[in-house]
Image: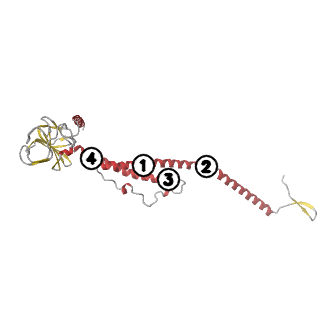
Amino acid sequence: MRKHKYFLDLNDLQYKKVRLSLEKKLLRVVLWFAGTIAITIFYSTVFHNLFGSPKEALLNQQIGNIRLQYTLADRNMNNSLKLINSLRMSDEMRYRPVLDMDSLPESYRNPGFGGVDRFADLDGYGTSYLMKSSRMKIEEMKDMLSVQSESFSTVKDKAAEWKIEMDHLPAISPVDPSFPLGEGYRFREVHPVYGDSRMHYGQDIEVPYGTKVYATGDGKVVEAGRNTGGFGNVVMIDHGYGLESIYGHLSKILVPVGMNVKRGDLIGISGSTGASTGPHLHYQINKYGQPTPAINFFNNDITQDQFNEMIQAFESKSKYR
């Protein structure tokens, strides 16, 4: 039951009920509403700061998950950058030097982005820094991979070209290396047949009659027959790249002019035809038409078994070409 307030009226010495004016009643109502609203705002603010709204709590949790995902992605991208740099080092320190290729300019490998903020659309978010950092690393990796892919493609083409050149290089002994080497590239005071002084441009190998003679590199037979210059029965192979190999004093020729041969193919049998005092093989290398020491082109430090295994491998490979 609502309590009423009374006051003593001194005129008639009676207690009378206190009656508020309309203005005071309205003021009370306004003050009551204002106080209620103030208290509501106060408690809402305290609760919000301490606990937050359920929706905001969910959003904060999602933002936390996004930050975690960006952090993990950033770690993976750092590992990917290390891998790309490893490929780059292999390219620059291994493949290109071996293939005699120039290094790529640093300005080409790292062109840079310029002064424009390319990721301004990511501003204004709670994770803007993480998103920008990730986008920047992604763009960097895309550029690096594009350059590296193009570089490896060039290296691959060069390696294929280099392999063809190596296959054509006259790089093995034309006969079993167990046979001793004879007279090499030098000036002769007295020629054993003609008796005059002249240059000996080849490498003689002391082989008996009937020894198998092999092509020392891929090429095309450009001469196969009797030679009037003292080589007797001779085979000449053009290997390309300015190199020719000559096999002189043969007793039998097994390849015709125009035939393409592979390294290790049997091309003739040794003998003593032409200007020769006994059975041997005259082996000569011409570089751009000029004789050069043949001994510089092959390694004679292998055993007979190793040489035979090598020839068998070449023969087996040749069947499937």
Specify which label sits upstream in the sequence, 4 or 1.
1
- Which amino acid, mark 4? Trp
Circle 3 is placed at which residue position? 131
Disc number lying in front (4 or 3): 4
Q: CA distance from mark 4 to mark 1?
A: 30 Å
Quarter that holds the C terminus: top left
- Which amino acid, mark 3? Met
* Colour scheme of the picture: secondary structure
Label 3, secondary structure: give it: helix
Hey, which residue is sitting farthest bottom in the picture? 11
Q: CA distance from mark 1 to mark 3?
A: 20 Å
Q: Residue at x 78, y 60 (%)?
A: 28
Q: Mark 2: few, some, or many residues within 10 Å (few <14, many ≥20)?
A: few
> Which sits in the foreground, 260 or 254?
254
> Which sits in the foreground, 320 or 34?
320
Quadrant in the picture for residue 164: top left
- Which amino acid, mark 1? Lys
Circle 2 is placed at which residue position? 57
Q: CA distance from mark 3 to mark 2?
A: 22 Å
Disc number lying in front (2 or 1): 1
Circle 1 is placed at which residue position? 82
Circle 4 is placed at which residue position? 162
In the figure, is residue 82 to the left or right of 1? left
**Mark 4 touching mark 3, by CB under 8 A?**
no
Specify which label sits upstream in the sequence, 2 or 1.
2
Hey, which residue is sitting farthest right in the picture? 12
Q: Mark 1: few, some, or many residues within 10 Å (few <14, many ≥20)?
A: few
Specify which label sits upstream in the sequence, 4 or 3.
3
Specify which label sits upstream in the sequence, 1 or 3.
1
- Which amino acid, mark 2? Ala
